[in-house]
Amino acid sequence: MELVIAPADELAVLAADAVESLLRAKPDAVLGLATGSSPLAVYGELARRHAESGLSFASATGFMLDEYVGIAADHPERYRNVIEREIASPVGWPSRQVHGPDGSAADLPAACAAYEKAIVDAGGVDLQLLGIGTDGHIAFNEPGSSLASRTRIKTLTSQTRQDNARFFGGDVEQVPRHCLTQGLGTIMAARHLVLLATGRGKAEAVHQLVEGPVSALWPATVMQLHPHATVLVDEGAASRLQLADYYRETYASKPSWQGL
Ligand SMILES: N[C@@H]1[C@@H](O)[C@H](O)[C@@H](COP(=O)(O)O)O[C@@H]1O
């Protein structure tokens, strides 16, 4: 696992660099897309590069991490709509190439199985962007999630619903109770994981993710078992790391030819 501690704007540039080098080397790459506020600056940077230097998503495929169940199709916070607004549309990415779990399906387990198959059929995810919840969830894999889980229905914790209430006018009752989410096993099958976390509110989750014991209680800790995981954090999110000085030293002495 590589840990980078830097100001938030630099983290977004680093993550965008990783996406750009992948797309330049493999235009039909498969990208894993996260929602939440953490990846927004990355999406902004990618949109800027699309507009200014022609970075193209025309042949790429995207897979979202998760989706609410029981949210109106035209709700601005439906993750499908968020991804369309924040990244697909700004980079000219054809909608038919960007996929998400179908939270409005009549048969939700079948929709989950179909989603797993679609990811495999596309060749698997090359680079998965991730955020992290204050309780250590990734996608919507709440504490207690099986470390081997696949796309399925989950019930959101009250902590996550409170955290996400800000997207629903501050009213926690408006936040759906259920979701479809890629499982931890699904996420672990991606070839490169890039997680972004900023602010002191994420400090404990980041400490557990990087330095805690691997445990379903802190689902993101499963990333310790991934052969290529990059964790990008600002000073606030790094504030509880025991080995922060070592991570800084390692990154400062990293050879310039070595990407993320
Ligand atoms: N399902 C999403 C996660 O994918 C995201 O990582 C998390 C953190 O969100 P934020 O980046 O806004 O802190 O929120 C939601 O619960």
Image: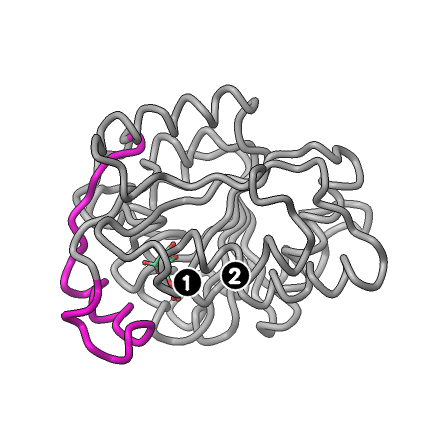
In the image, ligand 1 is in what quadrant?
A: bottom left
Q: Which of the labelled discs sits on residue 133, or is there none?
A: none
Q: CA distance from mark 2 to mark 1?
A: 7 Å
Please rate how many residues cluster around mark 2, counting C-alpha atoms within 10 Å: few if below 14, some from 14 to 19, many from 20: many
Which residue occupies 28% across, 57% down?
Answer: 72
Which residue occupies 58% across, 40% down?
Answer: 31
Please rate how many residues cluster around mark 1, counting C-alpha atoms within 10 Å: few if below 14, some from 14 to 19, many from 20: some
The answer to whether the residue bearing label 2 lies less than 8 angstroms from the nearest atom of ligand 1 is yes
Residue 260 placement, left or right of 51: left
Q: Nearer the viewer, residue 52 or 190?
A: 52
Q: Which of the labelled discs sits on residue 39, or is there none?
A: 2
Please tell me in which quadrant of the rendered image residue 43 appears.
Answer: bottom right
Q: Which of the labelled discs sits on residue 36, or is there none?
A: 1
Which residue occupies 29% across, 43% down?
Answer: 103
Residue 62 placement, left or right of 225: right
Please tell me in which quadrant of the rendered image residue 95 appears.
Answer: top right
The count of marks equals: 2
The magenta stretch is: 150-175
The answer to whether the residue bearing label 1 lies less than 8 angstroms from the nearest atom of ligand 1 is yes
State whether residue 62 is above or below residue 236: above
Residue 24: say if magenta: no
* Contact? badges 2 and 1 (CB < 8 Å): yes
